[in-house]
Structures are given as structure tokens and as C-alpha cells.
């Protein structure tokens, strides 16, 4: 009887779980849900399978929530409660609008400085074509709200239909706080208005803070400085603060989960104890990919994965089959070609950086790649699969 070959590579499965509430034993629920799925659906776990847990259920099980009053109290304590520059926020009802409400409650006046033509993750305030037509240089020109409206009028978001300029201004005024809105990309521009600043960018925050302090700002906080410790018993995140938070209700935010390593290690151990299989485990949030139509970069979290087991450290180390077939072995075919390629894979170096046969492979962090796959698998709506099982990710052509 001929040997049976595997004909399937990587498989990504959404795993249905009970609705998670604060105080639930999340590691037990995740491990049991994965094992039950294998039994009910008729597949087997293998060593180096990846169990990925969405960050929201980790934070929910931890009860990692804060109110807009907690945000207000922390902002007031750290930035003085007078005129505060709020710089470079992303344009998002889910991600920033509730945070802005809390920030506004902690200030007498906000100078809201928006980057243009889009925010950091690609949400447009105005198209590049309109910028070009107006003869505006976004790298140097500072626009008042009046000048912005005069040049570009009202611009509603392509997907949400929201005019974020008006929306954010209204939120601040509803809190009884005065607001002045300006448009600029040079961080130093805010210093013409105030020297107490909350810069709300995500991936560029360290650079922005450095530039502002060097230019003479008195106080500069980034979003990871706000709620990086508990305020009156609130949730917190000591590493990321408000970064990675989401709207929970009109009055509360769910923070990015903290203390994730004990969770992933617990899940790993439970599955090993019950099945004998050594799986890798990670917590994931946003994937790291960009929408080609809306030009929006998905990654509004500070990282894709805040916690993961050791087997997920590093980047892929892969050869490009297409390159081998078209170059090294272009004169071979059939079984001879298959064996030649298989031999190259088995004998590949541990580090292929600079090797032409690896060009076109994806030199990104494993957690960014797998987290993106998981984010697309679980979705953000009503699929009810907050855990994803990825099998065969570390296989290659020889397995």
C-alpha cells in the first residue's frame, strides 16, 4: 500500500467559545474549547499548532475597563487641566471618540491638532488630489479650521460617513470644554498654542515626544502615559495605557490586556497535559495589513500580539519554490524536480538573509503574520470565534 501524503498545508479555524465575562477562567475555557472542537469536528491537534486568543476576551476576563471620568482625572493630574494640545489622534468612533470625551473632561481648553491629508492609519480628512489642487504643502503649512473649510469644505469618511472634524469638535464642546482645531504635520506647530501636550499617535509617538521636548514643551504625555496605573480602582495597562483601547459603552473603554504571559503559558500547559501536544499560544489584536480601497492600515493597536510563547519568536526562514524551479532547477521536472527542491529545503541554512533563493518571502515577525491571519479569520463582528487554531503553519514542502 502506497504511503499516504498530506495534501493540505496551513489551515486556519475559528473556534467557538462561550461568551467570556469578568472573572472567568479564560485559560481553561480556551483549552477546553479547542480540545472539544477537535473531538466534535474530527481533526487532531499536532505539535506546533498555534492557538490564538483575541485580546478582547483577555481584557474582558481581566475586567480591564476604565471610565471616561478615570481618563479625565489622569489627564488633569498629568497635564494640569488648563489648555492642552491634543495631537495626531486617529479618526475613529470605536478607538478614540470615547477617549476624547474623557480627555476633554480633564481640560478647560483643547487645541486639537489633526494630521492631514489623513491620520496615522490612513483615514482621510481630504484627498491628496485636493491638496495638490489647492497648492497646499502638508509638510509645512498649518491650516486653521476656517482655512480648511474654505479650501476643502466638508469631507465625510468613505466608510462611516462621519465628518470627523465636526464630530471631534462637538465631543469636546459637549464636555463644556473650549476647542480650537488646527491642521498640521510638524509636531512643533502645537507649541504656538500651548506647551502642555497629549500626543495621541500610536507608532510614531516616541519620535513626536522627542521632537516636542527638544523644542521646549513643558509637559508631554503620550497615550501610553494615560491610565498606565489604576485610577480609583480602574483597569489600567502599565505598558500601553490607553493605546489599544476600544469603546465599551458611551462611558467606558476596554483597555488592551495586561499580564498576558501567564495566560498563554497556562493554555499551553493545559493542552499539553490533556493531549500530549506542544502547541504555541498567542494573544492577538489588530492584524498588520492595509486596505487597498480605503487606504486604511488596520494596525490601530500598539502591537499585533502583546503576549506569545517562545516558539513564536522570530521571522520565517523560507525558500521561494518559484525561484528554485525557475533558476536552480529549471532543467528538471517531475519527481526529479520534486526531490531536488525537497533536498534544498531540508538542507537550507538557519538564516537565509541575503540568499537570492529567499527573495519574495515575507521577512516579518511570525506574530505579525499569524496575528493578521487570525484577525481575518475571527473577524470583528458576529462570527463568535474569538479563538483561532492555526495548523500546519510551520510545515513546508517536505512535510
Image: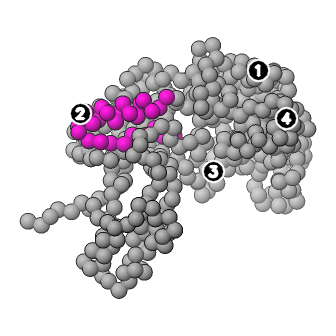
Mark toward the start of the polypeptide (2 vs 4): 4
Residue labelled with disc 1: 76
In the visual, does 272 lie left or right of 298?
Answer: left
Q: What is the number of the mark on residue 274?
A: 2
| Of the image marks 3 and 1, the number of the one nearer the N terminus | 1
The first of marks 1 and 2 along the sequence is: 1
Residue at figure coordinates x 52%, y 29% from the top left: 258
Element assignment for label 4: loop
In the rendered view, does 293 fall on the left or right side of 305?
Answer: right
Nearest to the eye among marks 1 and 4: give it: 4
Q: Secondary structure at mark 1?
A: helix
Residue 320: x and y in percent read 43, 69
Residue under the image location 40 percent in, 80 percent down: 328
User: Element at badge 2?
Assistant: helix
Q: Which residues are magenta?
A: 259-286
Q: Determine the residue positioned at 57% across, 21% down.
A: 235
Picture quadrant where residue 39 is located = top left
How far is the residue under mark 1 from the one under mark 4?
17 Å
Amino acid at each position: 500500500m502506497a504511503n499516504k501524503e498530506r495534501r493540505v498545508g496551513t489551515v486556519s479555524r475559528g473556534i467557538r467559545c462561550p461568551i467570556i465575562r469578568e472573572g472567568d477562567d479564560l485559560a481553561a475555557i480556551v483549552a477546553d474549547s479547542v480540545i472539544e472542537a477537535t473531538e466534535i469536528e474530527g481533526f487532531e491537534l499536532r505539535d506546533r499548532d498555534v492557538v490564538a486568543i483575541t485580546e478582547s476576551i483577555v481584557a474582558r476576563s481581566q475586567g480591564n475597563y476604565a471610565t471616561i471620568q478615570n481618563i479625565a482625572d489622569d489627564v488633569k493630574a498629568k497635564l494640569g487641566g488648563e489648555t492642552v494640545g491634543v495631537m495626531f489622534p486617529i479618526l475613529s468612533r470605536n478607538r478614540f471618540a470615547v477617549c476624547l470625551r474623557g480627555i476633554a473632561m480633564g481640560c478647560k481648553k483643547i487645541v486639537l491638532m489633526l494630521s492631514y491629508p489623513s491620520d496615522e492609519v490612513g483615514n482621510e480628512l481630504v484627498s491628496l488630489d485636493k491638496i495638490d489642487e489647492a497648492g497646499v504643502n502638508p509638510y509645512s503649512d498649518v491650516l486653521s479650521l476656517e482655512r480648511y473649510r474654505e479650501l476643502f469644505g466638508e469631507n465625510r469618511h468613505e466608510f462611516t460617513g462621519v465628518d470627523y472634524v465636526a464630530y471631534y469638535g462637538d465631543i469636546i464642546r459637549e464636555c463644556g470644554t473650549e476647542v480650537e482645531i488646527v491642521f498640521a504635520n510638524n509636531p512643533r506647530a502645537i507649541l504656538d498654542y500651548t506647551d502642555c501636550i497629549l500626543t495621541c499617535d500610536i507608532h510614531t509617538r516616541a519620535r513626536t515626544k522627542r521632537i516636542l521636548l527638544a523644542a521646549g514643551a513643558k509637559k508631554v504625555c503620550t497615550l501610553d502615559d494615560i491610565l498606565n496605573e489604576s485610577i480609583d480602582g480602574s483597569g489600567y495597562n502599565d505598558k500601553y495605557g490607553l493605546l489599544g483601547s476600544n469603546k465599551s459603552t458611551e462611558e467606558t473603554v476596554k483597555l488592551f490586556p495586561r499580564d498576558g504571559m501567564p495566560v498563554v503559558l497556562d493554555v499551553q500547559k493545559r493542552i499539553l497535559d490533556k493531549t500530549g501536544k506542544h502547541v504555541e499560544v498567542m494573544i492577538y489584536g489588530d492584524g498588520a495589513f492595509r486596505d487597498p480601497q480605503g487606504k486604511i492600515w488596520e494596525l490601530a493597536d500598539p502591537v499585533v500580539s502583546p503576549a506569545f510563547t517562545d516558539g513564536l519568536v522570530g521571522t520565517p526562514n523560507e525558500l521561494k519554490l518559484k525561484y528554485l524551479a525557475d533558476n536552480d532547477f529549471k532543467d528538471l521536472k517531475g519527481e526529479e524536480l520534486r526531490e531536488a527542491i525537497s533536498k534544498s529545503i531540508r538542507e537550507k541554512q538557519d538564516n537565509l538573509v541575503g540568499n537570492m533563493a529567499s527573495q519574495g518571502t515575507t521577512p516579518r515577525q511570525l506574530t505579525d503574520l499569524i496575528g493578521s491571519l487570525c484577525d481575518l479569520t475571527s473577524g470583528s463582528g458576529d462570527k463568535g470565534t474569538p479563538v483561532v487554531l492555526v495548523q500546519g503553519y510551520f510545515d513546508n514542502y517536505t512535510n
